[in-house]
């Protein structure tokens, strides 16, 4: 117990430092720190599946200490936590760039096999209502038990379609599919704790229905990475989709992993900016990412403009890109305003 308390205090201190970097809008610093933390956790045997259980416990703790969480408060916390903490942490814990194709295929095969089993939905319903520390207010979401079973069957089919899109390399299509259901879920009162409880309940269901010889540790890690990075984070970031869609379309068209001035200029051209602003924007990106002597990647660009659109949710893609290219690096901007 004393060791757990010590680790809790260390974690709280680490998060406080990360929040300070967020306040200074140095998002790349936060990202590097979280990736580094994930890398260190590899040697401790931490698995991606643990992240879900930890998030459930953390949200429940916040709810208890704040005498409840409104939908807006829970989503706001979860947006920051998912995007700035979980995503880069998993990138350090797992080689996401190298593992993504295998993750997509593994999850698709796992879901297809599980859906075939006659006891799948029955087990899932039971497990949803018995997630330890999870969100239990499921009856509010469904008219009756039959409606719940039908909805969960539809949800599994939907996730199969998403995994299939990703497996076929249609990443933009998969993400637009996810974003398309975001408002429906929020309007129905679905909160992040519901989604986390579903992720955990499905892990238990996989183990019961297809067995540990199919739902291996590797498969469980794939399921956790899929739910965290391709479902929950995409749902939470749906309000900023206009800029993300345009940047992801550019990423699909540019056809290269590394980004030089020519590739970056092809993005700024979409925002009707001239070459000089493209050069300034690329220099800012290098400064903030710390990649002066190594290649910038397409994912660096996607991440950067996702962060920018979160600061200015009402701005168009063109205005987000123009503002980024005209402004100095975030650290310099913060110091000049201090």
Image (cartoon, rainbow, N blue to C red):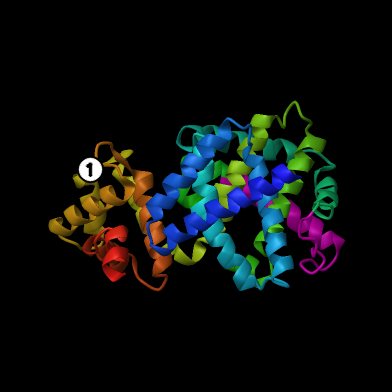
Residue range highlighted in magenta: 133-162
* Residue drawn at 48 percent across, 55 percent down: 18
* Residue drawn at 44 percent across, 49 percent down: 31
Residue 333: percent from left, percent from top: 28, 64
Toward the viewer: 179 or 137? 137
134 within the magenta span: yes
* Residue drawn at 72 percent across, 32 percent down: 215
- In the picture provided, is 283 more to the left or to the right than 101? left
* Residue drawn at 83 percent across, 55 percent down: 129
255 within the magenta span: no
Residue 185: percent from left, percent from top: 64, 65
Quarter of the image for the N terminus: give it: top right
Q: Quadrant of residue 117 in the image?
A: top right
- In the picture provided, is 327 more to the left or to the right than 88? left
Q: Can you identify the residue that label 1 sits on?
A: 260
- Magenta: main secondary structure equals helix
Toward the viewer: 328 or 82? 328
Residue 287: percent from left, percent from top: 27, 50
- Disc 1 secondary structure class: loop
Spot the residue most to the top: 213
* Circle 1 crowding by C-alpha within 10 Å: few under 14, some 14–19, many from 20: some
């Amino acid at each position: 117990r004393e060791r757990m308390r010590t680790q809790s205090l260390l974690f709280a201190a680490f998060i406080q430092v990360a929040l300070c970097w967020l306040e200074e809008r140095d998002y790349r610093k936060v990202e590097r720190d979280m990736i580094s933390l994930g890398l260190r956790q590899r040697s401790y045997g931490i698995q991606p599946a643990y992240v879900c259980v930890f998030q459930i416990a953390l949200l429940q703790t916040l709810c208890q200490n704040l005498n409840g969480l409104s939908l807006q408060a829970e989503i706001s916390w979860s947006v920051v936590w998912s995007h700035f903490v979980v995503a880069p942490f998993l990138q350090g814990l797992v080689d996401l760039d190298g593992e993504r194709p295998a993750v997509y295929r593994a999850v698709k095969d796992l879901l297809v096999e599980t859906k075939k089993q006659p006891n799948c939905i029955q087990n899932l319903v039971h497990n949803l209502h018995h997630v330890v520390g999870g969100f239990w207010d499921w009856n509010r979401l469904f008219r009756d038990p039959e409606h719940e079973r039908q909805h969960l069957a539809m949800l599994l089919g939907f996730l199969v379609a998403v995994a299939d899109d990703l497996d076929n390399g249609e990443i933009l299509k998969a993400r637009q599919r996810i974003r398309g259901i975001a408002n429906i879920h929020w309007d129905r009162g679905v909160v992040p704790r519901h989604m986390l409880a579903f992720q955990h309940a499905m892990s238990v269901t996989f183990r019961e229905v297809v067995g540990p010889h199919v739902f291996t540790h590797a498969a469980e890690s794939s399921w956790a990475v899929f739910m965290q990075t391709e479902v929950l984070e995409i749902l939470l970031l749906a309000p900023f989709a206009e800029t993300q869609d345009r940047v992801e379309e550019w990423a699909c068209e540019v056809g290269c992993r590394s980004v030089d001035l020519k590739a970056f200029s092809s993005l700024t051209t979409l925002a009707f900016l001239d070459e000089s602003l493209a050069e300034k924007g690329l220099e800012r990106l290098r400064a903030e990412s710390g990649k002066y002597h190594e290649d910038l990647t397409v994912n660096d660009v996607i991440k950067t403009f996702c962060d920018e659109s979160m600061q200015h949710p009402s701005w168009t893609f063109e205005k987000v890109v123009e503002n980024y290219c005209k402004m100095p690096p975030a650290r310099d901007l913060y110091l000049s305003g201090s």
